[in-house]
Image (cartoon, coloured by chain):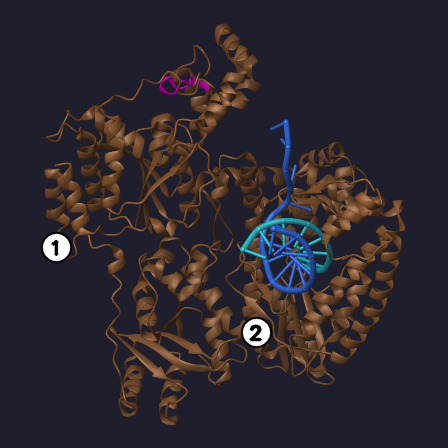
Chain colours: A brown, B cyan, C blue
Amino acid sequence: MAKILILDGNSLANRAFYALPMMTTADGKPTNVLHGFMTMLLRLLLEQKPDYWVVAFDKTKATVRIEQYADYKAQRKETPDALKPQFDFLKELLTAFAMPILECPGYEADDIIATVTSLAEQREWETQIYTGDRDALQLISPRTTVYLTRKGISEVDAYDEGALYEKYQLRPAQIIDLKGLMGDASDNIPGVPGVGEKTALKLLWEYGSVENVLDNIDKISGKKLQENLRNNTDKALLSKKLATMLYDIPLEINLDRLVYRRPDEKTFTAALDKYVLKSVARIWHEHHGAGEEGKDTPREEVLKPWPLCELTGEEWLVRLPQWQADQATLVVTCANTGGNPHWARITAWGIAAGGESFILNWTDAAPEVQMAFSQLLEDPEVPKQVADSKVLYSLLLNEEITLRGVSLDIGLAAYLINPTRNKFEPLELVKEYIPGAGEFANLAEEASALAQVADSYKETLEELGLSALLHEMEEPLSPILAEMEKQGIAVDVPRLQEFGQELTVELQRLEQEIYADAGETFNINSPQQLGHILFEKLGLPPMKKTKTGYSTDADTLEELRDQHSIVERVLDYRQLSKLMSTYVNGLLAQIHEGRVHTTFQQTVTATGRLSSTEPNLQNIPIRLELGRLLRKVFTPTQEGWVLLSADYSQIELRILAHYSQDKVLCESFSLNQDVHTRTASEVFGIPMAEVTKDLRRKAKAVNFGLIYGLTDFGLGRDLGVPRKEAKTYIETYFHRYEGVKRYLEEIVVKAKEEGQVRTLLNRLRRIPELRHPNRVQRQFGERIAMNTPIQGTAADIMKLAMLGVAEALKPYRANLLLQVHDELVIEVAPEDLEEVAKVVREEMESAFPLSVPLIADCKTGPNWYNMESYSLE
DNA sequence: TCCTCTGCT
DNA sequence: TGGCGAGCAGAGGAT
């Protein structure tokens, strides 16, 4: 994990000034701050060996906080004359030291620190903040520690979550509440009169936050205190706001630029001389001097490619069998002809083994050499470490080689360690542990760099308890996905073209009618132009706005449907045009020899689901009949075979039942009831037999909402009922399903404590949003905390099921084709259908035992549209 | 490259 | 106080 140090320049300079005796150069320039600051900096460099670091400074006096509160920092003493010029000297010195400096007009160093911290959190870096300002304690997290100066600046106290709790019994987010109540004399933040640290802490222990304290004034003991709180609610809330560090300052910050770099010796020495900082120079040369390699060698220099060993054809024929006999661990990378891995060809290999690196030109290799390397790749006993095994499986299938013995997929490892990261190129994977790594000159360097980080990945996986998930689920899934992609699904091209022609006719007709309605031609696909026609020319009432103008989305148009004939036509046009562009044309462009070969992305989603691209076969229309017809074009590849679709019934609600152990929900599944009908019966207080369609629909929306982190707003919008009504549904639901309520509350509390959630199979997702100062962001984090264990566990179970199904299908004439989150699509020879359906269902239902039954329903048919339920009983 | 819109679970 | 159910991919327009 990379480490970043963030220093509060103003705060530390102030501390240094008051802590150290006056020092001056011969011509009278004050230098005590320079001395103190640089000493600290060099010590941190030596002891902490940061990969990245930065000093933040206040830029000007006019801060956004003054706009909020005119007296902000008004009391503050004028900066002493001996300190003032030292800021410029210090910045000059730091620049000579190649230390990154950040300033932002109108904002304080605090806000820069908060912003950098939040960026570092996103990258999951270990973050250390050095400051004398206790406000920074609000930034503490599992990966962020705040070091507060004690006595001058040479001694610091480390505050992590534990230390903070020990000292104040507060969570980091409550620091701003503390300030809100007690204020801060040095910043002239008022707080509540008569409330000091003692009282503020007592109130927070009891009520948690400023808002909650103010909501419960009546319950607080002490008449005077009650009165003070009552008369100063504004001050308390304002003070809290002033103490909140701002994350979203208008400053482009590229964390990569904050990488530690060794200063240019001459420049730095000259600057030290200028300010006569002899002891600083001595420390620098003692520990960081030119001849002293290794002591503080920045990590960017650690990446030393293993020596490149060039082998002749004969030498390869000796070396390859040798590796195979030794069962040597190989790190393997390759280059290919580019484009889609489903048909790209491998051109060269990079190999790292035993401290040496190699390049094998594949295109021109002798057949014997190719054969020897193939054997190595196919030998399950020869462990291979790779960056992206699924792509490698695919590429090797094109060479008619079956890769076996992948012992570490570093890309998948990185995904499990942080499923929200989005870069998985080898260089990015290497940078995680060797931050300064530059571009690779060739494949050998790439392989040797990967080899040097492989163990670090393994350690991190072990620490996070993710090794089993990697080796027993994700890695074995990769070859299965590669096979599914390779197999592809057949598309009835003439039928698709015909469908496209029908759409085209309809589209042209609608287009003309819309132009006639509008009285002019325009681009219907442009929301902007459409908005102009609807709301300006035709005078329809705008319902809502987007960032760039009027909203013209389906909800809006639905509201306006009756007001003008153009509206319905636009809705129809949109539907058809989506089908035409995305599905007809999109699909036709992806067809190779009558089939489409999607790519399943295994490292994209934050929850552990797969995603599907080029083409996306996980969003083929089904809801509306017209779109659903598209499914007719998806057929088995072989004449006479049939498609089998098996999907989990209500898997997410079953997982919720398992997690929450809610009596009603569990009973509902154990009795195999229709869960939405049962919910309607509970919420509306009527027998199940009397539940109407409409009540069931409402209950269904509630059940769905639960999984996503229910809000009355969202439910109300979905059901088209007032928010208040939605609220009563939710309240009644939670009254009847107390276990669910308790579970959802507990998971949020736990997530806040740990800053992360896990699925049943231990998949991890960190949720930095939970400690974001913005409440909207925080609530977003809470919904993630509720949804991810459920959605992620469903993804886990499906992946386990796929491993079982793939194995179970081997004896049969059947191919796994698609996974659509809770559904598997398989093509199968009709004579094997009965048995295949049986084993698929068994594998899916027994993939992972929950405390309620898992049910998979099978359907079968000649294409993906005409599917009929298939049951064995 | 971002935004809006729409398709799926 | 205003803003919001979760997770994705792709097309087309505007910038």
Q: Along the line of sight, which residue is nearer the eye, A731 or A584?
A: A584
- Which circle marks residue A292 in the picture? 1
Amino acid type shown at disc 1: Glu
Which region shows up in magenta? A181-188
Residue A806, label in figure: 2
Chain hosting mark 2: A
Query: In the visual, does A27 lie left or right of A580?
Result: left
The part of the image, by quadrant, that contains residue A175 is top left
Q: Is residue A184 magenta?
A: yes
Residue at left offset 30%, top offset 30%: A11
- Residue drawn at x 74%, y 79% is A493
> Do callouts 2 and 1 mark residues in contact (Cβ within 8 Å)?
no
Label 2 Cα neighbours within 10 Å, binned few <14 / some 14-19 / many ≥20 = some
Is A181 on the left or on the right of A233, as rendered? Answer: left
Residue A643 % position (x, y): 71, 75
Question: In the rendered view, does A675 fall on the left or right side of A202?
Answer: right
Among the two numbered marks 2 and 1 on one chain, the one whose residue lies closer to the N terminus = 1
Is residue A122 rendered magenta in the image?
Answer: no
* Disc 1 element: loop
Give the dominant element type of the magenta stretch: helix, strand or loop: helix
* Chain to which the residue tagged by mark 1 belongs: A
